[in-house]
Image: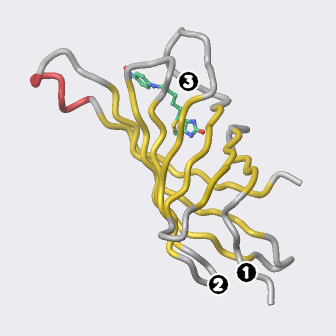
Amino acid sequence: TQQCNIQGQWRNNLGSNMTIQSVSDNGAFAGVYLTAVSSVNTKIVESPLTGFWKKSKQPMIGFAVKWAFSDSLTVWAGQCFLNENNEEVLHTTWLLRSKQKALQDNWKATRIGVDTFTRLK
Ligand SMILES: O=C(CCCC[C@@H]1SC[C@@H]2NC(=O)N[C@@H]21)Nc1ccc([N+](=O)[O-])cc1
């Protein structure tokens, strides 16, 4: 029966591309992330990604991207579900942390959002 596999290429609702290249037996994986959007005026470049998945028919996933072009870092947590057409969809929530100069600015350092990823054919 069909089940979600996380290896390969994914695209999210913003048009960002995630490529999961290597998956270990303990569920760790690595890859690269190319975001389609950013709120800093530096050139967007591919950034390293690492995470874990918990194997099952509809596995849980957690991963982080350290942005290579910005003093910030994002973590995603979510789960893969099969939709009515038996296609894999990753439903995630993310936290985007940007570096602050001072503790007084810590209050404004973390953004939250949701991203949905579908497999790139
Ligand atoms: O903009 C950035 C770096 C790029 C973040 C892309 C986000 S990650 C969640 C969402 N899903 C995606 O595929 N792409 C977006 N960093 C940043 C953001 C804000 C500030 N800030 O100062 O507010 C500084 C750096």
Report the quarter where the C terminus lies: bottom right
Residue 59: where, in percent of width, then height? 57, 75
- Mark 3 or 2 closer to N-term? 3
Dot 1: few (<14), some (14–19), or many (≥20) neighbours within 10 Å?
some
Question: Image quadrant of residue 47?
Answer: top right
The nearer-to-camera label among 3 and 1 is 1
Report the quarter where the N terminus lies: bottom right
Residue 24, placed above or below residue 111 = below
The residue where tag 2 is placed is 57
Residue 38 numbered tag: 3
Dot 3: few (<14), some (14–19), or many (≥20) neighbours within 10 Å?
few
Residue 48: where, in percent of width, then height? 54, 35
| Disc 3 secondary structure class | loop
Q: Amino acid at mark 3?
A: Ser
The residue where tag 1 is placed is 3
Residue 49: where, in percent of width, then height? 53, 42
State left or right for residue 35 relative to residue 105. right
Q: Are marks 3 and 1 in contact (CB under 8 Å)?
A: no
Residue 30: where, in percent of width, then height? 56, 49
**For the view shown, which residue lies furthest in the left direction?**
104
| Disc 2 secondary structure class | loop
State left or right for residue 11 relative to residue 78. right
- Mark 3 or 1 closer to N-term? 1
Residue 79, placed above or below residue 33 = below
> Does mark 3 have its CB less than 8 Å from ligand 1?
yes
Q: Amino acid at mark 1?
A: Gln
Residue at the spot x=39%, y=45% of the render?
95
| Disc 1 secondary structure class | loop
Q: Are marks 2 and 1 in contact (CB under 8 Å)?
A: yes
Q: Amino acid at mark 2?
A: Lys
